[in-house]
Amino acid sequence: MSGDQGKGERVLRLVTSNEGKAREFAAALAGISWKVERVASTYEEIQADTLDEVADASARQLFAEGTVPTPFVLEDAGLFIDGLNGFPGVYSAYVFQTIGHQGILRLMEGIRDRDASFESRIALCLPGGDVELLSGTCPGTIPRAMRGSGGFGFDPVFIPEGDYRTFAEMNIAEKEEHSHRGNAMAALRERLARL
Ligand code: ITT
């Protein structure tokens, strides 16, 4: 499938089923010279031990299907909690759907080590099918109770390092300054500027 380069305005497709993610991408990529178009579909995610493998394989699979024009990006993210040996990690989406952030707080009862990190891998699929991975990380801690109503997913139960608020108590720009996705999107902006 051919890309959109050389046709005037350049279009980057963002493939995600997650509204919250889509809002954050739209805000962070608003000023760039690319038009970002969301493709609100789900895609098959392989079972693997790392976000790198999941993001890379998902992008290659989607390219092989030929349903989304290149270039496109997708993202795999996860919350890795030290006191739970990295859980939920690559299983974050399933864990969020099943036990939610209340379930995470219950699992953390009695655990003193509250350190955790959010990780983001953006897979950028280029015309021709090459896939590049862009990473972002955000260290932080898990509070004893949920706080805030903004954002999505595990935001009410994550306090980024250097702040006292949870992600759910921040607006979208404040979250972006700290977040795993904010860091990965900064790398994506730089990469797009060189395409
Ligand atoms: P797509 O794969 O369709 O993009 P998803 O919701 O399945 O959407 P992920 O697999 O990347 O996305 O995310 C795993 C889960 O991790 C997700 O369901 C959220 O609950 C959580 N998550 C990811 N990024 C987050 C963030 O910035 N804040 C809070 N929770 C987040």
Image (cartoon, grey):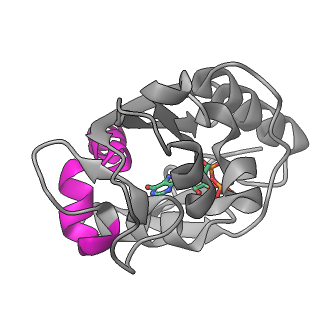
Q: Residue furthest left?
A: 162
Residue 173, magenta (yes or no) = yes
Q: Quadrant of residue 37?
A: bottom right
Give 19 or 150, whichever is nearer the viewer. 150
Relative to 139, say whether 37 is above or below.
below
**Residue 124, quarter of picture:** top right
Q: Nearer the viewer, residue 104 or 191?
A: 104
- Seen in the picture, residue 155 relative to 55 is either above or below; the reply is below
| Position of the C terminus by quadrant | top left
Q: Residue at x 59, y 33 (%)?
A: 89
| Image position, residue 128 (x, y; %) | 68, 30
Q: Nearer the viewer, residue 171 or 66?
A: 171
- Tell me where the magenta segment starts and ends, as one range: 168-195
On the question of residue 23 being in view, the answer is yes
Q: Is residue 9 visible?
A: no
Q: On the rendering, which quadrant does ligand 1 occupy?
A: bottom right
Mostly what secondary structure, the magenta segment?
A: helix
Magenta stretch holds residue 112: no
Asked whether, in this view, residue 190 is left or right of residue 135, the answer is left
The x and y percentages for residue 188 are 36, 41
Residue 75 is left or right of residue 64, and the answer is: left
Query: Percent position (x, y) of residue 19?
Result: 57, 73
Residue found farthest to the right: 65
Q: Residue at x 34, y 70 (%)?
A: 168
**x 81%, y 51%: residue:** 43
Instruction: Compare residues 147 and 6 and report the one nearer the observer.
Output: 147
Q: Quadrant of the N terminus?
A: top right
- At which x and y percent is residue 54? 70, 29
